[in-house]
Amino acid sequence: MADQPIAVDPDLYAADSTYNPDDWQSETTSIGSSIYRGLMDNGRRYQSLRNKEYILPSDEQMFETYEAGHLVDLIMDSHRDNPLFRSPVGDDPQHILDIGTGKGTWAIDVADMFPGATVRGVDLFPPPVTWMPPNCVIEVDDVLQEWTWREPFDLIHMRNMIGAFDFKEWDRLYRECYDKLRPGGWIEQLEVGPFVRSDDGSLPPDSALASWATIVQQCGERAGRPCDIVNSLPTSIRKAGFVDVHEKTYKWPIGPWPKDQKYKEAGTVNIQHWLSGMEGWCMWLLTKYGSPEPWTKDEVHVYVANLRKDLKNPHYHPYHKARRVWARKPMPGEVVGGPSPSSIIS
């Protein structure tokens, strides 16, 4: 169960131990395009397709972060035959959409799983991939614009979309997903929360890492980009008309401190997820919406350095929570009752 404390390994593993190898990630290949060079800001590259600024960079370092997050997803559900998603789409889905596909790894893996399906991955910036299965299509597009896909989808998947949209845009996106799913089709979303905790009190309340969620959340509020959507997922999805809502919560350890081998492996990858991602996660927010006034680039770098120091302290046992929600579009004529609690999956 996600609410049970994670047992701590009595042996200490530093962040540069054998549980934290340098070659944890697969190689990435940069993609060159004169059309999608993006916008440079504070040394990071951002998408230029959408007129509205986007909270996260679109550069090689962020693609590495996406890859690490994907690996943590897989490890946390590695006991399942299908760790990629939980929606019961059957053995022969025809059309699958991955919104915010990032590097495209999830879409490619699902395309390999269902060679008879067309799997589309869509994002605002072209991912650095040089090969994909013939049934996988990666598209550069803005899902807030009119959807032009004709075939109804069996599954629409999203993950790690914190800060991507404002509240009205989220409502619009969920309605669009509802309209473009076939009756009986599924929506599934996995999000991780910014709230870093420790069950044993090992993370000092005055540490930089403990301050992370408050700072990010407050900046997100000022920017109009909610950064705590992990808490509102079931309500938002149900509000769009979906039924048969299920959810699964996780504790994602940060670092190799857990005793259990699966959690240790997840924590080993997740600390790399944080180390490669932290600057990109907060640079735009802090330099645009920091308090009491926008931070400078150098101030962000100092803060990130303090976060790195906390992350590498083997005496701290931090984790953050993740939530997976999957729900179904009703069949024609199906009687849908009032709001009901989500089904909590262990």
Image: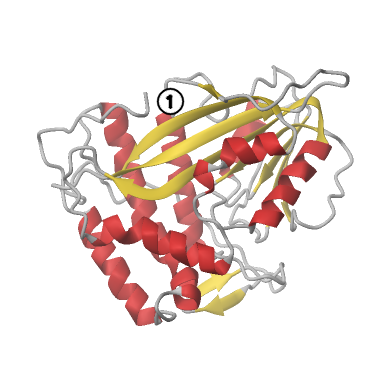
Please report the residue visible at 67 percent of the width from the left and 42 percent of the height from the top.
Answer: 98
The correct choice, above or below, for 50 with respect to 25 in the image is: below
Front-most of residues 179 and 81: 179
Please state the horizontal and vertical placement of residue 81, each as a whole percent of the image.
51, 18
Identify residue type, mark 1.
Answer: Ser
The residue identified by callout 1 is 78
**Helix or strand or loop: what does disc 1 sit on?**
loop
> In the displayed structure, does residue 334 sit left or right of residue 42?
right
Please state the horizontal and vertical placement of residue 160, each as a whole percent of the image.
53, 48
Is the C terminus in the top left, top right, bottom left or bottom right quadrant?
top left
Is residue 157 visible in this depiction of the protein? no
Please report the residue visible at 49 percent of the width from the left and 71 percent of the height from the top.
Answer: 284
> In the displayed structure, does residue 128 sit left or right of residue 142?
left
Is the N terminus in the top left, top right, bottom left or bottom right quadrant?
top left
Outermost residue on the left side: it is 11
Please report the residue visible at 55 percent of the width from the left and 30 percent of the height from the top.
Answer: 84
The correct choice, above or below, for 43 with respect to 268 in the image is: below
> In the displayed structure, does residue 279 sit left or right of residue 146?
left
Q: Residues within 10 Å of mark 1 (few under 14, many from 20)?
A: some
Query: Based on the displayed image, in which of its 4 quarters is residue 262 positioned?
Result: top left
Please report the residue visible at 54 percent of the width from the left and 47 percent of the height from the top.
Answer: 229
Please state the horizontal and vertical placement of residue 270, each as a whole percent of the image.
35, 45
Count of numbered circles on the image? 1
Outermost residue on the front side: it is 338
Query: Based on the displayed image, in which of its 4 quarters is residue 111 positioned?
Result: top right
Front-most of residues 182 and 14: 182
- Here the colouring is secondary structure
Please state the horizontal and vertical placement of residue 151, each as a whole percent of the image.
87, 36
Is residue 315 visible in this depiction of the protein? yes
